[in-house]
Amino acid sequence: MDGASPLQSVDIPSLQGKVSDEEWAVRVDLACAYRMVAYYGWDDLIFTHLSARVPGPEHHFLLNPYNLMFEEVTASSLVKVDTHGNPVDPTPFITNPAGFTIHSAIHMAREDAQAVMHLHTPHGQAVSAHEEGLLPLTQTAMLIRGALGFHDYEGVATDLEERERLVADLGDKQGMILRNHGTLAVGGTVGECFLTLYYIERACQAQIMALSAGDRISNPPQGTPELAAEQGAVGLKVAANLLAWPALLRKAYRLDPSFAT
Protein backbone atom coordinates (compact mmCIF):
# COMPACT_ATOMS: atom_id res chain seq x y z
CA MET A 1 0.00 0.00 0.00
CA ASP A 2 1.41 3.37 -0.92
CA GLY A 3 -0.94 5.30 1.36
CA ALA A 4 -2.73 7.02 -1.51
CA SER A 5 -6.18 8.33 -0.61
CA PRO A 6 -9.27 7.53 -2.71
CA LEU A 7 -9.29 11.15 -3.87
CA GLN A 8 -5.71 10.93 -5.07
CA SER A 9 -6.62 7.85 -7.10
CA VAL A 10 -9.37 9.74 -8.96
CA ASP A 11 -8.09 11.16 -12.21
CA ILE A 12 -9.48 14.66 -12.62
CA PRO A 13 -7.93 16.21 -15.75
CA SER A 14 -7.86 19.98 -15.66
CA LEU A 15 -10.41 21.82 -17.78
CA GLN A 16 -8.61 25.13 -17.56
CA GLY A 17 -8.01 26.32 -21.11
CA LYS A 18 -10.53 23.76 -22.43
CA VAL A 19 -13.57 25.84 -21.49
CA SER A 20 -14.16 29.56 -21.92
CA ASP A 21 -12.55 31.97 -19.48
CA GLU A 22 -16.03 32.96 -18.33
CA GLU A 23 -17.01 29.36 -17.58
CA TRP A 24 -13.72 28.70 -15.81
CA ALA A 25 -14.28 31.72 -13.54
CA VAL A 26 -17.71 30.41 -12.56
CA ARG A 27 -16.23 26.95 -11.97
CA VAL A 28 -13.63 28.38 -9.59
CA ASP A 29 -16.24 30.39 -7.71
CA LEU A 30 -18.61 27.43 -7.36
CA ALA A 31 -15.84 25.06 -6.28
CA CYS A 32 -14.86 27.66 -3.67
CA ALA A 33 -18.46 27.75 -2.44
CA TYR A 34 -18.45 23.96 -2.03
CA ARG A 35 -15.24 24.14 -0.02
CA MET A 36 -16.61 26.95 2.16
CA VAL A 37 -19.82 25.00 2.84
CA ALA A 38 -17.63 22.11 4.01
CA TYR A 39 -15.44 24.49 6.04
CA TYR A 40 -18.44 25.88 7.92
CA GLY A 41 -19.79 22.37 8.54
CA TRP A 42 -22.94 22.90 6.47
CA ASP A 43 -22.48 19.85 4.24
CA ASP A 44 -24.57 16.71 4.56
CA LEU A 45 -22.20 13.94 3.45
CA ILE A 46 -22.53 13.99 -0.37
CA PHE A 47 -26.12 15.26 -0.35
CA THR A 48 -27.62 18.66 -1.27
CA HIS A 49 -26.33 20.78 -4.12
CA LEU A 50 -24.89 24.12 -5.10
CA SER A 51 -25.35 24.96 -8.78
CA ALA A 52 -24.41 27.77 -11.14
CA ARG A 53 -25.41 28.75 -14.66
CA VAL A 54 -22.78 28.36 -17.38
CA PRO A 55 -22.35 31.65 -19.27
CA GLY A 56 -23.75 31.45 -22.79
CA PRO A 57 -27.03 30.92 -24.64
CA GLU A 58 -27.32 27.22 -23.79
CA HIS A 59 -29.28 26.20 -20.71
CA HIS A 60 -26.34 24.47 -19.07
CA PHE A 61 -25.41 24.41 -15.42
CA LEU A 62 -22.59 23.26 -13.17
CA LEU A 63 -23.25 20.66 -10.48
CA ASN A 64 -21.10 18.64 -8.13
CA PRO A 65 -20.22 15.01 -8.85
CA TYR A 66 -22.52 12.93 -6.68
CA ASN A 67 -19.74 10.74 -5.31
CA LEU A 68 -17.39 13.45 -4.01
CA MET A 69 -17.48 15.10 -0.61
CA PHE A 70 -17.83 18.88 -0.77
CA GLU A 71 -14.26 19.26 0.49
CA GLU A 72 -13.06 17.28 -2.57
CA VAL A 73 -14.86 19.32 -5.23
CA THR A 74 -12.63 21.14 -7.71
CA ALA A 75 -13.32 23.51 -10.58
CA SER A 76 -12.57 20.74 -13.08
CA SER A 77 -14.62 18.05 -11.35
CA LEU A 78 -17.85 20.06 -11.55
CA VAL A 79 -20.17 18.44 -14.09
CA LYS A 80 -21.89 20.46 -16.81
CA VAL A 81 -25.52 19.33 -16.94
CA ASP A 82 -28.69 20.15 -18.86
CA THR A 83 -32.02 21.21 -17.36
CA HIS A 84 -32.72 17.61 -16.34
CA GLY A 85 -29.43 17.21 -14.49
CA ASN A 86 -27.92 14.92 -17.12
CA PRO A 87 -24.27 15.43 -18.15
CA VAL A 88 -23.74 17.42 -21.34
CA ASP A 89 -20.26 16.02 -21.98
CA PRO A 90 -18.72 12.61 -21.19
CA THR A 91 -17.64 12.49 -17.55
CA PRO A 92 -16.19 9.85 -15.23
CA PHE A 93 -18.48 11.10 -12.48
CA ILE A 94 -22.08 10.34 -11.66
CA THR A 95 -24.72 13.00 -11.08
CA ASN A 96 -27.98 13.04 -9.17
CA PRO A 97 -30.67 14.23 -11.63
CA ALA A 98 -33.39 13.93 -8.97
CA GLY A 99 -31.47 16.27 -6.72
CA PHE A 100 -31.37 18.88 -9.47
CA THR A 101 -35.18 19.20 -9.53
CA ILE A 102 -35.25 22.20 -7.20
CA HIS A 103 -32.31 23.90 -8.86
CA SER A 104 -33.48 23.46 -12.44
CA ALA A 105 -36.89 24.90 -11.65
CA ILE A 106 -35.41 28.09 -10.23
CA HIS A 107 -32.66 28.47 -12.83
CA MET A 108 -35.18 28.16 -15.65
CA ALA A 109 -37.80 30.47 -14.11
CA ARG A 110 -35.49 33.27 -13.01
CA GLU A 111 -32.93 34.83 -15.31
CA ASP A 112 -31.27 36.42 -12.27
CA ALA A 113 -30.80 32.99 -10.65
CA GLN A 114 -27.22 32.52 -11.75
CA ALA A 115 -26.52 30.44 -8.64
CA VAL A 116 -28.79 28.30 -6.44
CA MET A 117 -27.68 26.72 -3.15
CA HIS A 118 -29.61 24.28 -0.97
CA LEU A 119 -28.64 22.88 2.44
CA HIS A 120 -29.88 20.43 5.08
CA THR A 121 -28.11 21.80 8.17
CA PRO A 122 -29.51 20.85 11.59
CA HIS A 123 -30.17 24.51 12.45
CA GLY A 124 -31.82 25.20 9.10
CA GLN A 125 -33.96 22.10 9.39
CA ALA A 126 -34.93 22.99 12.94
CA VAL A 127 -36.11 26.46 11.94
CA SER A 128 -37.89 24.99 8.92
CA ALA A 129 -39.91 22.88 11.36
CA HIS A 130 -41.04 25.97 13.32
CA GLU A 131 -44.55 27.11 12.42
CA GLU A 132 -43.45 30.76 12.23
CA GLY A 133 -40.17 30.00 10.48
CA LEU A 134 -37.35 32.49 10.92
CA LEU A 135 -38.07 34.92 13.75
CA PRO A 136 -36.71 38.52 13.99
CA LEU A 137 -34.61 37.76 17.05
CA THR A 138 -31.20 38.91 15.79
CA GLN A 139 -29.84 41.53 13.45
CA THR A 140 -28.81 38.84 10.98
CA ALA A 141 -32.34 37.42 10.92
CA MET A 142 -33.86 40.88 10.47
CA LEU A 143 -31.50 41.65 7.58
CA ILE A 144 -32.49 38.55 5.60
CA ARG A 145 -35.99 37.66 6.83
CA GLY A 146 -37.86 39.87 4.36
CA ALA A 147 -36.03 38.28 1.43
CA LEU A 148 -37.29 34.77 2.21
CA GLY A 149 -40.19 32.77 0.81
CA PHE A 150 -41.65 29.54 2.22
CA HIS A 151 -42.49 26.25 0.54
CA ASP A 152 -44.45 23.43 2.20
CA TYR A 153 -42.94 19.96 2.29
CA GLU A 154 -44.13 17.59 -0.45
CA GLY A 155 -41.76 14.67 0.06
CA VAL A 156 -38.34 14.09 -1.51
CA ALA A 157 -38.13 16.57 -4.38
CA THR A 158 -38.29 14.15 -7.31
CA ASP A 159 -41.72 15.15 -8.65
CA LEU A 160 -41.24 17.48 -11.61
CA GLU A 161 -44.72 18.90 -11.04
CA GLU A 162 -43.50 20.36 -7.75
CA ARG A 163 -41.23 22.73 -9.67
CA GLU A 164 -44.09 25.10 -10.53
CA ARG A 165 -45.09 25.36 -6.89
CA LEU A 166 -41.50 25.92 -5.81
CA VAL A 167 -41.10 28.76 -8.27
CA ALA A 168 -44.42 30.32 -7.28
CA ASP A 169 -43.56 30.19 -3.58
CA LEU A 170 -40.12 31.69 -4.18
CA GLY A 171 -41.42 34.51 -6.38
CA ASP A 172 -38.77 37.21 -6.62
CA LYS A 173 -37.26 36.42 -3.20
CA GLN A 174 -33.56 35.75 -2.70
CA GLY A 175 -33.99 32.79 -0.40
CA MET A 176 -36.44 30.24 0.90
CA ILE A 177 -37.22 28.14 3.94
CA LEU A 178 -38.23 24.71 2.66
CA ARG A 179 -40.53 23.65 5.50
CA ASN A 180 -39.46 20.46 7.32
CA HIS A 181 -36.58 20.24 4.86
CA GLY A 182 -33.91 22.95 4.84
CA THR A 183 -32.76 26.24 3.39
CA LEU A 184 -32.20 27.65 -0.08
CA ALA A 185 -30.57 30.76 -1.54
CA VAL A 186 -30.54 32.39 -4.98
CA GLY A 187 -28.06 34.91 -6.33
CA GLY A 188 -27.01 36.88 -9.38
CA THR A 189 -23.47 35.62 -8.72
CA VAL A 190 -22.04 32.73 -6.73
CA GLY A 191 -20.83 35.27 -4.17
CA GLU A 192 -24.26 36.87 -3.73
CA CYS A 193 -25.87 33.47 -3.36
CA PHE A 194 -23.33 32.30 -0.80
CA LEU A 195 -23.64 35.43 1.33
CA THR A 196 -27.44 35.10 1.34
CA LEU A 197 -27.01 31.49 2.41
CA TYR A 198 -24.57 32.56 5.10
CA TYR A 199 -27.05 35.06 6.54
CA ILE A 200 -29.84 32.48 6.52
CA GLU A 201 -27.75 29.80 8.22
CA ARG A 202 -26.30 32.14 10.85
CA ALA A 203 -29.78 33.47 11.63
CA CYS A 204 -31.15 29.94 11.98
CA GLN A 205 -28.29 28.92 14.25
CA ALA A 206 -28.76 31.96 16.48
CA GLN A 207 -32.51 31.37 16.69
CA ILE A 208 -32.13 27.79 17.86
CA MET A 209 -29.50 28.83 20.42
CA ALA A 210 -31.64 31.70 21.70
CA LEU A 211 -34.79 29.61 22.06
CA SER A 212 -32.88 26.82 23.79
CA ALA A 213 -31.50 29.28 26.36
CA GLY A 214 -34.89 29.99 27.93
CA ASP A 215 -38.18 31.75 27.29
CA ARG A 216 -37.19 35.29 28.32
CA ILE A 217 -36.55 36.49 24.78
CA SER A 218 -35.88 40.17 24.07
CA ASN A 219 -37.86 41.15 20.99
CA PRO A 220 -36.67 44.14 18.92
CA PRO A 221 -38.54 47.46 19.17
CA GLN A 222 -41.49 47.94 16.84
CA GLY A 223 -40.44 48.95 13.35
CA THR A 224 -36.80 47.93 13.62
CA PRO A 225 -37.18 44.55 11.84
CA GLU A 226 -38.64 46.36 8.83
CA LEU A 227 -35.86 48.96 8.90
CA ALA A 228 -33.18 46.29 9.10
CA ALA A 229 -34.79 44.43 6.18
CA GLU A 230 -34.56 47.57 4.03
CA GLN A 231 -30.93 48.06 5.01
CA GLY A 232 -30.10 44.43 4.23
CA ALA A 233 -31.66 44.62 0.77
CA VAL A 234 -29.42 47.55 -0.13
CA GLY A 235 -26.14 46.25 1.20
CA LEU A 236 -26.05 42.53 0.40
CA LYS A 237 -24.94 42.69 -3.23
CA VAL A 238 -22.19 45.21 -2.51
CA ALA A 239 -21.00 43.26 0.53
CA ALA A 240 -20.97 40.02 -1.44
CA ASN A 241 -19.32 41.07 -4.69
CA LEU A 242 -16.84 43.66 -3.43
CA LEU A 243 -16.07 42.58 0.12
CA ALA A 244 -17.11 39.20 1.48
CA TRP A 245 -16.70 36.97 -1.58
CA PRO A 246 -13.17 38.16 -2.50
CA ALA A 247 -12.22 37.58 1.14
CA LEU A 248 -13.71 34.08 1.08
CA LEU A 249 -11.81 33.27 -2.11
CA ARG A 250 -8.58 34.29 -0.41
CA LYS A 251 -9.47 32.12 2.56
CA ALA A 252 -10.16 29.14 0.31
CA TYR A 253 -6.78 29.55 -1.38
CA ARG A 254 -5.09 29.65 2.03
CA LEU A 255 -6.91 26.54 3.24
CA ASP A 256 -6.38 24.41 0.12
CA PRO A 257 -5.78 25.91 -3.34
CA SER A 258 -6.64 22.61 -5.04
CA PHE A 259 -10.27 23.77 -5.35
CA ALA A 260 -9.19 26.02 -8.24
CA THR A 261 -7.67 23.19 -10.31
Image (cartoon, rainbow, N blue to C red):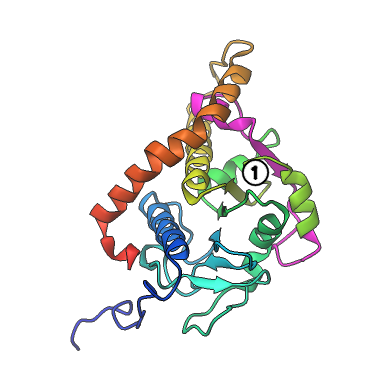
Circle 1 sits in a helix, a strand or a loop, which is it? strand
Query: Which residue corresponds to the image point at 77% horizontal and 66% vertical from the top-left?
Result: 160
Q: Closer to the camera, 68 or 120? A: 68
Depth check, front residue: 105 or 61: 61
Q: Position of residue 208 (x, y in %)?
A: 52, 35
- The quadrant the C terminus occupies is bottom left
- The quarter holding residue 72 reads bottom left
Which residue is situated farthest in the left direction here? Answer: 2
Q: Nearer the viewer, residue 207 or 26?
A: 26
Q: Residue at x 60, y 40 (%)?
A: 127
Q: Tag 1: residue type?
A: Ile
Which residue in the rendered view is the most extreme toward the top? 221
- Find residue 2 and report its image quarter: bottom left
**Screen quadrant of the N terminus:** bottom left
Q: How many labels sit on residues?
A: 1
Residue 161 among magenta residues: yes
User: Where is residue 249 drawn, in percent x and y?
Assistant: 34, 50
Task: Look at mark 1 in the image and give the residue it sits on.
Answer: 177
Tell me where residue 170 appears, x and y as whole percent.
71, 45
> Does 94 appear above or below 156?
below
Q: Which residues are magenta?
A: 134-162
- Identified at 37% across, 63% down, the residue is 71
Asked whether 68 or 33 is in front, the reply is 33
Which residue: 58% across, 53% down? 114
Residue 191, how many percent across, how many down? 46, 47
Query: Based on the displayed image, in which of its 4 quarters is residue 175 positioned?
Result: top right
Against 82, residue 252 (above or below) is above
Asked if residue 12 is among those painted magenta in the image, a careful observer would answer no
